[in-house]
Amino acid sequence: MSDLPRRAVTRSAKLATLPLGFAGRAALGLGKRIGGKPAEIVAQEIQQRTAEQIFKVLGELKGGAMKVGQALSIFEAALPQEIVGPYRATLTKLQESAPPLPVATVHKVLTEQLGDGWRDYFESFDDRPTAAASIGQVHRAVWHDGRDVAVKIQYPGAGKALLGDFTQLARLGKLFGVMLPGLDIKAVLAELRERIAEELDYLREAEAQHGFALGFQDDPDFHVPDVVAANEMVLVTEWMDGTPLSRIIADGTKEQRDRAGLLFVRFLFCSPARVGMLHADPHPGNFRMLDNGKLGILDFGAVNRLPDGYPRSFGQLTRIFNQGDMDSVVAGLRAEGFIRPDIEVDGDALRSFLSPYVEPTAVEEFTFSREWFQAQAANVTDLRPTNVVRQLNLPVSYVLIHRVHAAGVGVLCQLGTTARFRDEAIRWVPGFADDPEDEAVPVS
């Protein structure tokens, strides 16, 4: 756990460098203005250095700080690749190199959580973890009834470290205000803190995973391993073999990548309608292609509970965007809280920003690619105050939906999937296929 600073004073000191660093850069900017340097250039330099400092500090920490950095993908989209690239690389390195717990610590946790006779639950237990992440690690075992199982064990102290970050991250409000004046960062942080608290509760995760397993039981397209046993810090589920989506991305045939991408989208679109929940951590490590052609899904710690399915306005605004009525789109986004009352946005700039999320549903068949995504991102990756990304707010109710869709587009571009995504939106997204004459977009 050497790369997870757990002492509160250490983590606080790292996060405290952000406001101090920002104050120094603001003073530097003032000096340049006095020296006659154009104000817009000075502002851009301050914003870029602020972003570099934010990403540097967030990248050094696991836990809540790293989660915030990942979740604010809207922030990343507004920044040049030279800033965001190293940050993403740091996060990837942290995720891939999480050191496993010593065997003695694993056994201690199991004894504390399952009792002195914890070995009686298993026919066998592999002390070597099969996966290690930011808050826990997974071991393969055989349950006492002969079933192969995955045993997920939470790191001791992970919860305290995660939640402690958010107390410190509240200090970043002014910094994010420099970068994104339209964003209500306090509300976003509060929502993320609540979601992180849920991820730490393995009983809640077990409830969500069991709900998905029941909802997709015997499904022709999807498989969710069911829960075998759980408490707050240990989660035992059925084992699932399969080819990781990351391997399909790297080595899969075009046919395999098309199939995987279509099922990936279908799962994300249909889940709210079928089980009232949205899987909120859709990175390739949580998905497997099974030998029978199904898509297997893992890790239900981050789940957005949507008992009524996707918000109807989400489908309505997507449809109206495709029809070209940007005035109604802007009005609808204001009503939903994406554009705050004191903020004005340019319709054409907004269209460029939203295109990556909407364009695939405007045509019968669409191909995602890295080149397409880079071209889309080029429309919004600048730090000028007029950049529309900086003017947008992320309503609390859409924090996880945005996180899922932003991450999903990235995964599909890695896969290079060609598929009929519009059909999935028509089938599963409320409001998308409605006759526009029958129903108006809610505006305030």
Image (cartoon, helix red, strand yellow):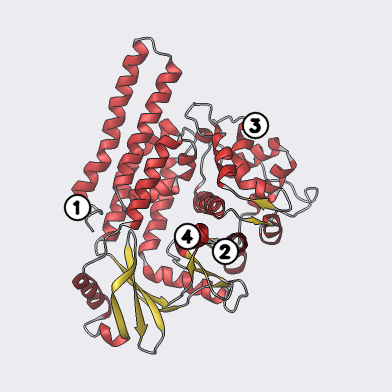
Disc 2 marks a residue whose amino acid type is Pro
**CA gap, disc 1 and disc 4:** 34 Å
Determine which residue is flagged by label 3.
348
Determine whether the residue tagged by mark 1 lies in a helix, strand or loop.
loop
Q: Estimate the x, y position of residue 43 in percent, counting from the top left.
A: 41, 22
Is residue 300 positioned above or below 66 on the image? Answer: below
Identify the image quadrant of the N terminus: bottom left
Residue shown at the point (21%, 83%) measured from the top left: 116
Determine which residue is flagged by label 2.
307
Determine which residue is flagged by label 4.
246
Q: Estimate the x, y position of residue 164 in percent, counting from the top left.
A: 28, 52
Disc 4 marks a residue whose amino acid type is Ser
Q: Estimate the x, y position of residue 242 in percent, counting from the top left.
A: 48, 72
Q: Earlier in the sequence, mark 1 or mark 4?
A: 1
**Crowd around label 2: few <14 · some 14–19 · many ≥20 (10 Å):** few
Determine whether the residue tagged by mark 4 lies in a helix, strand or loop.
helix
Is residue 162 positioned above or below 301 on the image? Answer: above
**Mark 4 and mark 1 in contact (Cβ < 8 Å)?**
no
Q: Nearer the viewer, residue 299 or 89?
A: 89
Q: In this view, does 365 lie to the left or right of 184?
A: right
Determine which residue is flagged by label 1.
7
Determine whether the residue tagged by mark 3 lies in a helix, strand or loop.
helix
**CA gap, disc 1 and disc 2:** 39 Å
